[in-house]
Every structure is written in structure tokens, then in C-alpha cells.
Image: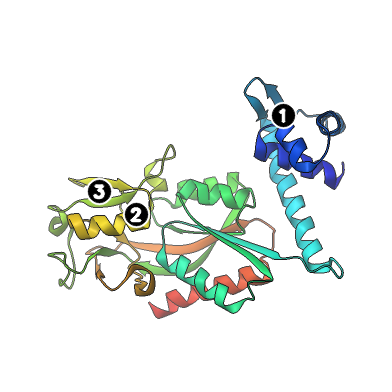
Amino acid sequence: MTLTQLHYVVKIADTKSMNKAAAELFVSQPALSGSVRDLEEELHIQIFIRTNKGIVLTTDGEEFLRYARQMVELSRMIDDRYGGEKKNRKRFSVSTQHYSFAVEAFIELGRRFAMDEFELAVHETKTYEVIENVKNIKSEIGVLYLNDFNRKALTKIFSDNGVEFIPLFSCGISVYLSGTHPLAKKKKITFSDLEPYPCLSFEQGDKNAFYLAEEVLSTLDYRQIIKANDRATMLNLMTGMNGYTLCSGIICENLNGGNYVSVPFDTEDTMLIGYIKRKKMPLSRIGQEYIEILKQYGAEG
């Protein structure tokens, strides 16, 4: 087994096509197929199934791919650190639920590092995709939350996907709404206060189990629920329809503007903000810096 073969497997899995992978790797399709076949024979497993619709991973292949991605990423990190005179751009990527503070922390990270030396990426996305991105090393870090309701289910998903959760800070639950909302000036908001207004929730696609919801207390019996795909739409719905969402209450006026407020919700429930990373894979220097920036939001709260 060689590192080149691992690169081949990752590229085929990403493109789902032997021909596309061969073109991007600048090798012939027969040479690529032969190399993967040799690897499969050496490991005594079948990694891919060839179908009329493209390449599909087997169960063994899915497990092997997780290790292959990790080895390829470690190889890249070694090249970045010890690659000799050639100056490679270091990469850092974070995936997050729709948290403005996680994006604001990313912006601060960009200010601290020379952008000609780093290639940075941030993905504000669905809960399951945050986990998938970290599992597949598309992102080094994933930012999300746990609470009493989702902890057991998500902890199992983390374990099954080879990632671990590290707590950052705990916070109470707040109602996030427009500054012009009829409830905006209340000191505390109850569930009955919210009944006349639509609850806003981020769409989770096919993976829409309650424990994957980005909003806490997702199982409450809301009279009206409106789904949205992005934070900008969510803010527009808050302003235009007096909608609200339940969240950590950490407000980033630099990103969302000053037209929104966070009011404590009348509940004893809390949420634990944290991050996930690949098990046994140390954080890069820039990853450590990002985590230190995130911790400040807990200290400020």
C-alpha cells in the first residue's frame, strides 16, 4: 500500500468516477483502475463497486476511506511543515451550524494570519454536514452544540464517524428576534408569549431528526414553524413576519446589524457550545488559534 494509492482512492470517492479521477490525477484510466485493484487484492477487501451510474463505495470501502483521508491529510500537513524551500499555502477549514459568532471568530482569525500564506474556508451548513465535513477532513473543526435532549444521539453519531466533541462554554437559552418585535423589550419571554408568532428553524434536508435541529427545544409544540436555509433569510423573516428562533443569545452586531435583540427564554435548559475534530488528530496551529477566539465568546457571556 502506498500513499499514491490512498490519494487515488480519495480522488475516486470524491469524483464518483474513474474517468474523472484519472483526468484530475493526470494518469491513464487503466493505470488508475489497476492500482486500485492491486490495493484491493493486497487488503483483501473490495473498496468500490463499478455501476452504470458511476463508482459506489462498499461498506469496507467507506471505512477504509476514512483512514485514507486521514493519511492523505497528514501527508499534506507534513509537506506544509517540512516541504523544504517551496512555500506552500497552509489550509484551514471550519464547518459550523448557523452561528454568527463562529463566522465572526473566523473573520478575526483571518485578520491575525497573513492571507498569502493560508487558504481559509468556512462552511455554514446543516448539522449532519458539519459532522461529515470533519469526518472526511474537509474541515478541521466543526462547531455545534449539545444539550440534554440531543447529547446521547449525537455522541453516538460522533463515535460512529470517528470524531470527538470538546466543550467550549455553556450558555442559557434566549429568544432571538427583531428589535421591532412586540416582545423585544421584555425582560424574559415565556413559551406562551411566543404562541402568536412563527418559530423559525433551519432546514436540515434529508437528515431532519429532532436531535439534529440547530434550534434548542425543537420538540416543543409550536403553532407555526417556518423553515429557512440560510441566516440572511432567517433575519428577513424575523423582520418581515415577527418570527423568532431559540438560540445561545450571542449577538454579533457587526455581522447581523443592530436591529436584532436577544431576550432570555423562561427555561432552566442550557446548551453546551463546543467543537468536533477527528479523533487522535491534533489541531493545527491556526486551528488552536481559532478555538482560543471562540472561547472568548463564552467568557464575554
The mark that comes first in sequence, 3 or 1, is 1
**Residue at the spot x=66%, y=31% of the render?**
59
Residue 154: x %, y % from top left? 48, 49
**Residue at the spot x=65%, y=19% of the render?**
52
- Secondary element type, mark 1: strand
- Secondary element type, mark 3: loop
What number is the disc on residue 215?
A: 2
The mark that comes first in sequence, 1 or 2, is 1
For label 2, count other residues whose C-alpha is less than 10 Å away and answer few (under 14), some (14-19) or many (20+).
Answer: many
Residue named by callout 1: 48
Q: Amino acid at mark 1?
A: Phe
Q: Front-most of 63 and 151?
A: 63
What number is the disc on residue 220?
A: 3
Q: Amino acid at mark 2?
A: Glu
Marks 3 and 2: CB-CB under 8 Å? no
Q: Front-most of 190 and 117?
A: 117
Residue 148: x %, y % from top left? 39, 55
Q: Amino acid at mark 3?
A: Leu
Q: Is residue 158 visible?
A: no
